[in-house]
Amino acid sequence: MATKSLKARNNDIANTSRQMEILSSGIFETGELPTFAAKIKETGQFPLRPKKLEILQINLGYMCNQVCEHCHVDAGPDRKEIMTVETMNQCLEVIKKTEAHTLDLTGGAPEMNPNFRWFVEEASKAGIKDFIVRSNLTIIRANKKYYDLPEFFKKHNVHVVSSMPHWTRGKTDKQRGKGVFDLSIKALQELNAVGYGIPGSDLKLDLVYNPSGAFLPGDQQALENDFKKALKEDFDIDFHSLFAITNLPISRFLDYLIASDNYEDYMHSLLDAYNPAAVENVMCTNTLSVSWDGWLFDCDFNQMLNLKVASKVKHIKDYNEELLQDRNIIINQHCYGCTAGAGSSCQGVVA
Amino acid sequence: MSKTYYDSADLRKFGKITEWSEELGNKFFDYYGKVFEEGALTAREKSLIALAVAHTEQCPYCIDAYTKDTLQRGVTKEEMMEAIHVGAAIKSGATLVHGVQMMNKVNKLEM
């Protein structure tokens, strides 16, 4: 288990242009597999264009208390990129006038941004009703100052979405680090205690499942049933929905695919499971992603590849929704990760 | 002809068997797909059965495919190994139960 980010290890793959080079060469260069652009052209879906903007996804920083093996953000305790109050204020200005109804806060561990709570409170005043916080769960138990997070979430009716790779300790700790399973269970029980995740409760608690290896997620509904049964029986835990998300071949997961000699097979699996119906609703069509330093991206993954939006407006300080929505979405071979099977997005399956 | 009898890249070419006998190939794949759908048994249970049978049949393609398939369905290593033991137990049981035939024959032949 790595305890440092790729960036801190000076790994080749921490360099985003190197990742783009890998994704454009080899099996895609020789024509063994079609590029994503060629594939969506088959069904007349090129260029990919945004639909109505619904979600503003803001990355509050890459700092995290965990170093997960598959992390596409390459987050970790050694990452110092944190959104400043100045950038947060620029985001708040946008929140006041955007058509987007949902604010999706992510990281790293978004709660580790020292101004996280202030930002949620201000966004709430600015009129945001639907908050999503991507919480890794263990943060709630990481330090006393975070113990009251469940109460804070409840106060602002935050929709909590948390990663949980499996209902067993072994598989969870292997992907997310030793001790993560027990801390996650404790955190889930505390969220349940304040009313999160209980059937019929308005306090939404959803879990995200990422496969812990070079394979795709199985059927979302079947996995949800298995998770619910096991977590209820073993730990008396309730949650609402499970989102099964496909790992995209970028950052740490790409590094793993190459190092374990799984890259080509994995890309073949994504191609075999390609579903044109999923292209219709990929998350980049209704989401805008804002990085910790205010740059704008079609999605979180493009952010990690440093592929800024193809628009005159590239930074939150110059935000203009009309101009931004009139753009082509930047695509590359990593996009196959969102169109496999029933599709994948931060909100679960799309087709 | 490759230098080895088995090549893992051949698994992806399985669908090509329809090229030399389209109707039978298609009928087989339709049937195959239908068998593994959610039914009275869950797709997860079927996948575990397939994994066990893949081992008793000692089919490397099937082992490759159903190890991946069970992983995708959230099956744990412990469950996978237990399923294989079920297959192994039936295999060895099937061998040993024939011991009764041997015993019968011995009893018949010996004075």
Image: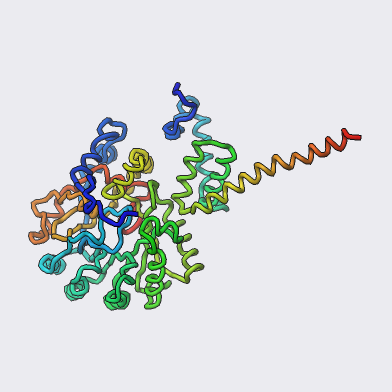
Which residue reaches farthest right?
Answer: B111
Is residue B67 found left or right of A147 in the rendered image?
right
Instruction: Pick the residue in front: A182 or A158.
Output: A182
Please name the colour scheme applied to the rendered image: rainbow
Residue in the picture at 56% in, 37% down:
B58
Q: Which quadrant is the N terminus of chain A positioned in?
A: bottom left
Q: Nearer the viewer, residue A98 or A110?
A: A110
Relative to A203, A288 lies left or right: left
| Of residues A60 and A217, the one drawn nearer to the viewer in this rendering | A60
Tally the numbered discs: 0
Q: Is residue A183 visible?
A: yes
Residue in front for this viewpoint, A196 or A250: A250
Q: Is residue B49 left or right of residue A106?
A: right
Where is residue A281? Give x, y as percent: 29, 52
x, y percentage for residue B28? 53, 35
Q: Position of residue A141 (x, y in %)?
A: 34, 71
Where residue A163 sits, quadrant-wise, is bottom left
- Name the residue: 34% across, 67% down: A137
Q: Position of residue A342 (x, y in %)?
A: 37, 50
Q: Is residue A284 visible?
A: no
Q: Residue at x 48, y 45 (%)?
A: B67
- Please name the residue shown 28% across and 51% down the image: A282
